[in-house]
Image (tube, helix red, strand yellow):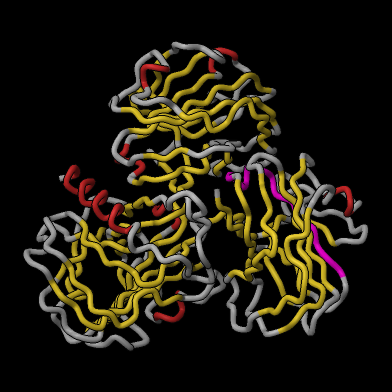
């Protein structure tokens, strides 16, 4: 059955390429940064346990219904542009095609961890706007085998940030031609609220269930997760015999295809500052398990995406976080073979512990430059960035900053390269709204960007932004009605070329506007965000990090 599911997934992923619009984006998003490369696609399956029940009313022959579903970020393990949503047909399947008129789907990031009986209380709570992605449309659900997934394409893609939980609401204003079941499993929180007979009711009945859902992404970050992790010291280590690590990731785990423009490994304990020199190769493999000879595990010629690059892991990165490796190239994954990631490290000042799960013959380790090594059962938790999404830096949003002010002043923000992950041309940035926005104009608003090897900001503005370039200059008009958690977008007049490995500084200045409003920052966190934010004009750097989004293309 699983082979059939994967075959259906691949057919749908290929067909989605023809449906991807040139621009757009839900939840205050915007066009993806596809550039000259194609857009990569992948599927994230949310199945927290074996299916134990099913819901018959969401897509059924009753006159109307309203269903709201909650999916947690911990279960999704991915981010990017959601282009379609799929539901599990449970054990009964869908015997023949079902048509449903007047179906509306909305999506939104949310700060709630459980739904309530009042639909509105779970959305627009500070993580962005609840967005219509399919509006009063007629849909056709194809015949679907038991426990397979049926697909519903969205007319407007929604950018899910991977940090907050996700709410999906399906309302139906008329009867379907037949019933399409929706598989679910019991959980400890209210993962569903529903009402039958009405698509406009404001309250419903909650249930402690998680709906089996698949989200199809076009561009974004896909975490290959293998279960509860243990710590693995290779390859960024002081132990010489563990510095050449080769990893095998199966096609079923990745469930995607297309250009990969970023690779991140997941740390399993709080990091200390460490510097390494790394070479990274990617390639396909038809083998179900690794052999002891590195070269023999590739079924094609591997692509070098990083060649002897200096790589610094910052201090204070907590367990479970992705640390992006420095890559300057890209690799187009075919989606059917397994994927090899080969990381060869020339040396290291500290051993960093990485997340892995015990699966036989998924890793091969040896000394730097070695041609053969020792097999190990280390399935490494790895994040793959498929082209077409954005680079998002999102934290707790606990602090605040006002780059849009009534006074004539500015701000500087710094991010480490390990927080970014992709080289290319940055054409636009956005910061995350701290509160609902009101219309206002900000005179002489400028944005300047610079790559730097500095790990902290200093008091001297010119030092921090040395060698930078102005990417926006003019009056900035703040749009009204963006909600807290939406993105305030600033398109560039001149793109900025980012090398994918240095740290990045953004400086904003303005002569001021009618009101002070702006963007969230995360912190304070002296271990992780040391001196990463400051007011211009000699201000003292503080331990906050800006919550920003960057559109980057290769």
Residue at the (40%, 80%) spot, across then down: 119
Image coordinates for residue 167, horizontal then vertical, percent: 41, 69
Q: Which residues are magenta?
A: 409-422
| Quadrant of the rendered image containing residue 534 | bottom right
Asked if residue 451 is among those painted magenta in the image, a careful observer would answer no
Q: Nearer the viewer, residue 193 or 81?
A: 81
Image coordinates for residue 77, horizontal then vertical, percent: 43, 50
Residue at the (86%, 76%) spot, across then down: 407
| Quadrant holding the N terminus | top left
Q: In the image, 48: left or right of 513?
A: left
Q: In the image, 9: left or right of 407?
A: left
| Quadrant of the rendered image containing residue 510 | bottom right
Asked if residue 410 is among those painted magenta in the image, a careful observer would answer yes
Q: Is residue 17 above or below residue 175?
A: above
Image coordinates for residue 153, horizontal then vertical, percent: 30, 67
| Residue 84 appears in the picture as rendered | yes
Q: Is residue 198 above or below residue 551?
A: below
Residue at the (35%, 16%) spot, across then down: 291
Residue at the (57%, 26%) spot, across then down: 279
């Amino acid at each position: 059955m699983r082979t059939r599911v994967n075959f259906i997934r691949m057919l749908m992923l290929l067909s989605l390429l023809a449906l991807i619009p040139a621009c757009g984006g839900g939840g205050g998003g915007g066009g993806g940064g596809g550039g000259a490369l194609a857009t990569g696609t992948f599927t994230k399956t949310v199945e927290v346990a074996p299916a134990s029940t099913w819901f018959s009313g969401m897509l059924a022959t009753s006159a109307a219904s309203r269903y709201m579903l909650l999916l947690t970020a911990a279960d999704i393990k991915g981010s990017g542009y959601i282009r379609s949503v799929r539901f599990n047909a449970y054990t009964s399947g869908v015997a023949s095609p079902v048509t449903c008129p007047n179906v509306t789907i909305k999506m939104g990031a949310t700060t709630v961890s459980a739904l309530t009986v009042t639909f509105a209380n779970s959305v627009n709570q500070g993580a962005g706007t609840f967005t219509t992605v399919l509006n009063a449309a007629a849909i056709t659900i194809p015949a679907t085998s038991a426990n397979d997934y049926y697909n519903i394409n969205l007319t407007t893609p929604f950018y899910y940030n991977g940090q907050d939980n996700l709410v999906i609401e399906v309302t139906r204003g008329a009867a379907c031609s037949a019933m399409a079941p929706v598989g679910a499993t019991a959980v400890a929180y209210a993962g569903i609220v529903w009402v039958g007979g009405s698509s406009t009711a404001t309250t419903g009945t909650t249930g402690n269930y998680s709906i089996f859902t698949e989200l199809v992404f076009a561009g974004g970050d896909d975490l290959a997760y293998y279960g509860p992790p243990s710590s693995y010291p290779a390859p960024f280590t002081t132990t010489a015999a563990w510095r050449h690590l080769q990893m095998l990731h199966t096609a079923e785990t990745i469930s995607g295809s297309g250009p990969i423009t970023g690779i991140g490994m997941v740390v399993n304990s709080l990091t200390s500052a460490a510097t390494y020199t790394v070479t990274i190769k990617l390639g396909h493999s038809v083998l179900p398990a690794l052999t002891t000879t590195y070269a023999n595990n590739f079924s094609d010629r591997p692509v070098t995406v990083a060649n002897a690059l200096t790589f610094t892991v910052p201090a204070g990165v907590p367990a479970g976080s992705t640390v992006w490796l420095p890559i300057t190239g890209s690799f187009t994954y075919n989606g059917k073979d397994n994927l090899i990631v080969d990381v060869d490290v020339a040396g290291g000042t500290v051993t960093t512990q990485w997340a892995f799960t015990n699966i036989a013959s998924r890793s091969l380790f040896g000394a730097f430059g070695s041609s053969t090594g020792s097999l190990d059962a280390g399935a490494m938790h790895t994040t793959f960035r498929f082209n077409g999404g954005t680079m998002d830096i999102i934290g707790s949003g606990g602090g605040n900053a006002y780059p849009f002010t009534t006074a004539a002043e500015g701000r500087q923000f710094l991010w480490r390269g390990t927080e970014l992950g992709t080289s290319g041309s940055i054409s636009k940035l956005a910061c995350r709204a701290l509160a609902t926005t009101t219309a206002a104009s900000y005179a002489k608003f400028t944005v300047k960007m610079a790559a730097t090897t500095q790990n902290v900001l200093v008091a001297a503005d010119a030092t921090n932004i040395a060698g930078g370039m102005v990417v926006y200059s003019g009056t900035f008009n703040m749009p009204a009605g963006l909600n807290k958690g939406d993105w305030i977008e600033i398109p560039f007049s001149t793109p900025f070329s980012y090398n994918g490995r240095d740290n990045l500084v953004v400086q904003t200045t303005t002569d001021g506007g009618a009101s002070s409003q702006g963007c969230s920052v995360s912190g304070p966190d002296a271990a992780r965000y040391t001196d990463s934010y400051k007011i211009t004009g000699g201000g003292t750097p503080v331990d906050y990090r800006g919550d920003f989004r960057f559109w980057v293309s290769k």
